[in-house]
Amino acid sequence: MAHEKSLNAAAMLFDFEGTLVDFQWQLSAAIEETLEILREMGFPPKRIQSRKYSTIMSEAMQAATEIGLSPDQVRERIGTVYDRYDEDALTRWTLRPFVLDSLAAIRAKGIRTALVSNLGGKTLTAALSKFCLTDYFDIVLSRYDVKHLKPSPEGLHLALEKLGVNKETCIFVGDSLDDVNAAKNAGIRIMIITAGENAAEDILAAEPDHVIQCYKELLLLL
């Protein structure tokens, strides 16, 4: 793990749930419901191997034509399930301490910012407004802006393109193994804040570049 005195970043990308707010998405229930819907759509029970919400959608889209469906049909159907779980989580999210202070300090230093989330756009927009975060981000990307969710690097690549910055000058701040893998797949440094989606020991085993426990630590690195 890197131990730099300063992050030296031209741009910082952020995940949302588990990173800027606490993690409230009901993972097990969402996965179970999604698998049931895929069975109803005609997918053979053993065709979909993934048991992660972040990869079930991509796997089902890839297999859609085998049962006479379009990938967009599958994406839309799963999306309606995920939208409900997004909205449910919105009712319980709490902003992590010192998030606003950190984002204000980042903006004051002229560092570009983007939000890259697996959440849907409607809930993400509502959450940014609810927590007074809207003005802190140059770019906001939801799952509806990409074909593949993190751990795919697609959203991070798109954010870099829109910001007009090189990956070497960027840091992605997240909370999950999907965030770690997305950043590594994109060739971007990854900072993980603990007490998010995945256990700290699992995060450490994935060897992120930086690990912080709270945003006070991020302020010291700016």
Image (cartoon, grey):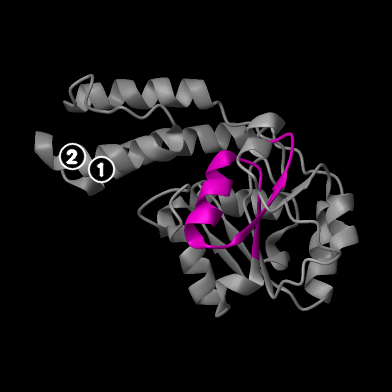
Task: Mark 1 and mark 2 in contact? Answer it, CB < 8 Å.
Answer: yes
Residue type, label 1:
Met
In-front residue for pair 215/25: 215
* Amino acid at pointer 2: Ala
Residue 51 in sight from this viewpoint: yes
Find numbered disc 1 in the image and state the secondary structure of the residue it sits on: helix
Give the quarter of the image for residue 136.
Answer: bottom right
Camera sees residue 199:
no
Magenta part of the protein: which range? Answer: 171-196
Q: Could you say where residue 147 lies in the image, as x and y percent from the top left?
A: 35, 54
Task: Give the number of the disc on residue 61.
Answer: 1
Q: Which mark is residue 163?
A: none
Q: Is residue 180 magenta?
A: yes
The residue that mark 2 highlights is 64
Of the 4 image quadrants, the one containing the C terminus is bottom right
Question: Which type of secondary structure does the marked residue at label 2 adopt?
Answer: helix
For marks 1 and 2, give the CA distance: 5 Å
Q: Residue placed at 83% from the left, 45% from the top?
A: 214
> Is residue 24 toward the left or the right of residue 50 in the image?
right
Residue 24 location (% of width, % of height): 64, 31
Quick check: 75 above or below 34?
below
Q: Residues within 10 Å of mark 2 (few under 14, many from 20)?
A: many
Q: Is residue 7 magenta?
A: no
